[in-house]
Amino acid sequence: MTTSSRPISARARILAAILAVACVGLAVVGSVTFLVQRDRVLTAVNARLQDQVTRLQTVATPDPTASATPSPSGTPDPDGEVTATETINLDQFDSVEDYLHAVVARLVPARNEGSVAVIDGEPRFKPSTLSGFDLSQNQALIDRAVAETADGEVKRGTFNDGTASLRYIAIPVTMEGDPEQGVYIRAIDLGAELEPVTATMTTFVVAALAVLAAIGVVGWFVAGRLLSPIRSLRDAADSITIADLSPRLPAEGNDDISDLTRTVNSMLDRLEGSVDVQRQLLDDVRHELKTPITIVRGHLEMMDPTDLDDVAATREIGIAELDRMTRLVDDIDLLAAVEGDAFSMGEIDLAALTARVGELVAVIPGHTWEVADTAQGDIVGDSDRLLQAWLQLADNAAKYTPAGSPIEIGSVRTADTVRLWVRDHGPGIPPAYRHRIFRRFDRAQGKRTVGGSGLGLAIVDAITKAHHGQCTVTDTPGGGATFTIQLPVAAAELPAPVRAGDVVLQREAAE
């Protein structure tokens, strides 16, 4: 998939997710803050309005002992407002008009407040100070307050005339013997009272936008930095071809991306090792098959069809070479099976395994076989594969040891190691060539033994590595070579199956 087919990059999606979370968080914080501050202002406004009832009485009776005790009560009206009732002492005034005049004169409105005294539905008195706003011109509010207080109870509510939202309280005033109906109205401009809160929220919004912009800029570069190994991985994957598997990613740091980089590098190492092994196998197979094909072709070209003896000899040579190629193909197939299969681990009786190998090698002609040591105890491994590897060592010793010479086998278990060995008394293997004999198609000093493919010891090594062990070669006292399969006891007791091919690839890649 090309980059142009992806409308939104991973970098943009990560940044969008970060900004979305930040936006939600800032919006929640701003909303909660605004609602809390707004509620505080509204609560304070309601308290100020409700306080007008008590202040209205103290204006009329400067001596608190001469006044009637206020008895406020509150019940919700159908609109959700609180209806308060209050008994007001008017004994010191002769008329409602005198009383309201005194109230308006003495109760000066604060900033963002307005008041008016209404008698019989008409505004009569208003404050002469300029600290508040003129409420006498708002006839709609006056009419509403007069109508609401017709039952003689104090009313509180909110009035919106399209230009301002006013929170008001209307206190009816009546006096025995005076037919006039008075109402004292006090209102507070909610918009003006909430203006500091609104200004604060405006400042918060501007600051939040600045924070989001900063998060966007920083997040863009941070996301790019974090994703740079991914882009390097993509570039490395694009540059890898079957001819060049060498590109690697620089692994720096200890974060998850660095771990991914090291994991990918390890995968590339295994992949390169696998390809190298396959190439080497193809080269070796081509080289091994070239010789018998050349021999058969050469003899066929020089054969005299009229000479029956020459035809018979050529036929024998051709069949012998074809048999050798068949054995080579069989060994390659066996090696592939060993390296590709998952081994079936189980408990193995070392004594029984040693006795079984002794029985099988006894039928190999040309040598005297002896079981020199028998280990006791159990190990965990694949019985069939270990038996196969041990027999391959015995067969290899029989091929390279002069006829009639003795060959010993044995097993030994110590606290840490299990050793399965085969000891011959042949020419031995020089130390300089011992590291080569376990490679595919490689032989000590390049010598070929009739019937051999050069894969026997490679199969043994693959089986041994799959059991977390190693196969070694040492000198036999008096002459000869001793091949030993060494299995660590701790590793041999692991129950998990192991792929032999993985271990072989790691070893051959390291070499």
Image (cartoon, rainbow, N blue to C red):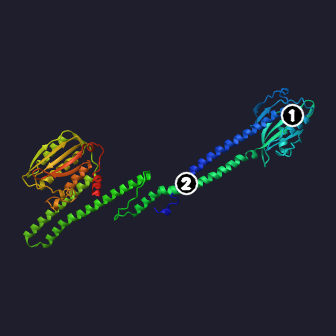
What's under tag 1, amino acid-wise?
A: Val
Q: Find residue 142 and name its label.
A: none
* Residue topped by disc 1: 173
The mark tally for this picture is 2
The one nearer the camera, 112 or 24, is: 112
Q: Position of residue 485 (x, y in %)?
A: 20, 48
Q: Residue at x 23, y 50 (%)?
A: 470
| Left or right: 279 as drawn, with respect to 221 | left
Residue at far front of view: 63
Residue 236: where, in percent of width, then height?
Answer: 40, 61
The answer to whether residue 17 is above or below residue 181 is below
Q: Amino acid at mark 2?
A: Ala
Q: Is residue 346 above or below residue 61?
A: below
Residue 278: x and y in percent read: 28, 60
Residue occupied by mark 2? 16
**Nearest to N terminus: mark 2 or mark 1:** 2
* Viewer-closest of 101 and 377: 101
Q: Position of residue 426 (x, y in %)?
A: 10, 54
**Within 10 angstroms of label 2, few (less than 14), some, or many (20 or more) residues?**
some
- Cα distance, mark 2 to mark 1? 63 Å
Question: Dividing the image into 4 quarters, which one contains the N terminus?
Answer: bottom left
